[in-house]
Amino acid sequence: MIIAFDIDMTLLDHKDYEIPNSAMLAIRKLKQAGHKIVLASGRNLHNYYSRDIVDSILPHALVELNGARVVVGKEVISDIIMDKALVKRILTYSEEHGEAVGMTDGDDDYYTNQDYIYEREMLNWGECGRRFKDYHLLEKMDVHTLVYYGDPAGAKRLGEHFPMLSVLLFSGKGGADIVPNGITKAEGLKELCHYYGMSMKDVVAFGDGSNDVEMLKEVGMGVAMGNAVEELKVVADMVTDPIGEDGVWKACKKLNFSLFLDWKE
């Protein structure tokens, strides 16, 4: 089977920015049983703030950027780029309205309203490790998806102004993924299933945010974390406990993976 995990607030707890030990143990046991582990995230998983996570889990495949890019090992099997004229329009709108929109590529951060991001991160964490560059450079780069930082009202206005985009709120409501309509983690998983010669019925997926809705609806078993947004819980086949209460492990036990029966809670 394919076992797909969202990262933020599904595997990675933002309270301490650590993956719970029980979730790491679950992943190790799933690998030992021969299941394929996939990270399915809105992140660019090749960026500086994601590499350590990928290296700690060593997944078989990545469905990243909300499904815009799918990677197996070092092979890119799907890669969808946003229209450059549309990217320019989004950046112009964001600049005019004082919104913080952009993306991180490699080791560099390209965002409008960089002061907002700096102040927000200093307030939340007491430091800002961003490596800001001129966001205008995005107009000539290959952009898959963008990220919005701000309140839900700003995200809603952005979505209304660009109806060809899906603006998907983070579960913490502090921002959103900006994705062209039709690009989803579910579509990325379909590409992966085709590659492996498997069916979406052979996929178990875990998530917590709005960008996980299509994925949980279309896989064989969709698991929403206890801390997930309500719209995800509604479509999930199972709602487990929150991330901080061993939600991943407990879901695996309920799914009757026999390899989990020997764990002592």
Image (spheres, rainbow, N blue to C red):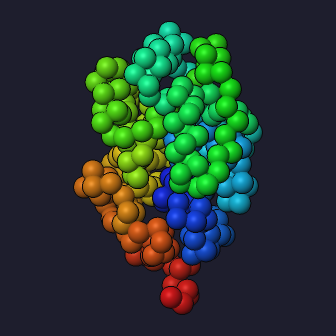
Q: Is residue 53 visible?
A: yes
Q: Is residue 64 left or right of residue 176?
A: right
> Of residues 190 and 41, which is closer to you in this image?
41
Q: Residue furthest left?
A: 234
Q: Is residue 201 left or right of residue 259?
A: left
Query: Which residue sits at x=41%, y=69%?
Result: 242
Q: How many numbered marks appear? A: 0
Give how far across and how far down residue 133 sits, in percent. Answer: 68, 26
Q: Quadrant of residue 69?
A: top right
What residue is at 37 percent from the left and 40 percent from the top? Answer: 151
The residue closer to the viewer here, 109 or 210, is 109
What is the x, y in percent for residue 180?
43, 25
52 over 189 or under it: above or below: below
Decide if residue 100 is on the left or right side of residue 222.
right
Task: Write the residue at 62% across / 28% down.
Answer: 110
Q: Quadrant of the rendered structure where residue 256 is?
A: bottom left
In this rendering, does residue 197 appear at all?
A: no
| Image position, residue 263 (x, y; %) | 55, 86
Residue at horizontal 43 percent and vertical 55 percent from the top: 207
Q: Residue furthest bottom?
A: 264
Picture coordinates of residue 220 (x, y %)? 39, 55
